[in-house]
Image (spheres, rainbow, N blue to C red):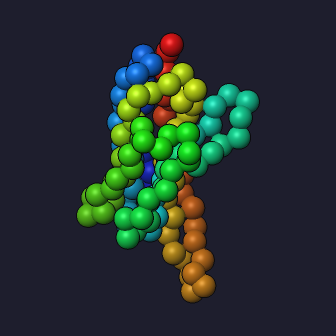
Amino acid sequence: QVQLVESGGGLVQAGGSLRLSCAASGTVNAMGWYRQAPGKQREMVAHITSGGNVDYVDSVKGRFTIFRNTTKNMVYLQMNSLKPEDTAVYYCNANQIVGPGPYYYDYWGQGTQVTVSS
């Protein structure tokens, strides 16, 4: 069982920056950040594989950067030029390979609130 603990959320003005951090209690495979705004479905924001390949939702490309420290089992999300529409609860996600196939198991953090004021 892997625990994910996020930190770094808060309140920031539009145009500002925040960095989210997520610590995994064990070795994981891919990691990522998702977000859920009130009344909306959870969406993938950024994803990074164990090999360092990254992917972003179109709305954050050029503003957000995901990176990880594999030796420390940590992933970060640097968020610049924040907009009010970035306001959401941000969740850390990680998976582990649990069987041949391969089969993956997903882990989730408890979420951290990011609020961007206009």
Q: At 47% from the left edge and 44% from the top edge, which residue is drawn?
A: 61
Give the quadrant of residue 98: bottom right
Q: Is residue 92 left or right of residue 85?
A: left
Where is residue 8? Give x, y as percent. Answer: 37, 33
Where is residue 9? Give x, y as percent. Answer: 42, 30
**View extreme (top): residue:** 118
**View extreme (left): residue:** 71
**View extreme (right): residue:** 39
Residue 34 visible in the displayed image: no
Q: Is residue 101 above or below residue 111?
A: below
Q: Is residue 58 above or below residue 24?
A: above
Residue 81 visible in the displayed image: yes
Q: At 56% from the left edge and 47% from the top edge, which residue is drawn?
A: 57
Q: At 55% from the left edge and 39% from the top edge, which residue is drawn?
A: 59
**Which sits in the foreground, 48 or 63?**
63
**View extreme (bottom): residue:** 100
Where is residue 105? Give x, y as percent. Answer: 58, 67
Where is residue 66? Give x, y as percent. Answer: 39, 49
Q: Is residue 92 above or below residue 82?
A: below
Q: Is residue 30 left or right of residue 59?
A: left
Q: At 63% from the left edge and 31% from the top edge, which residue is drawn?
A: 37
Picture mark count:
0
**Which sits in the foreground, 59 or 109?**
59
Q: Is residue 54 above or below residue 115?
A: below
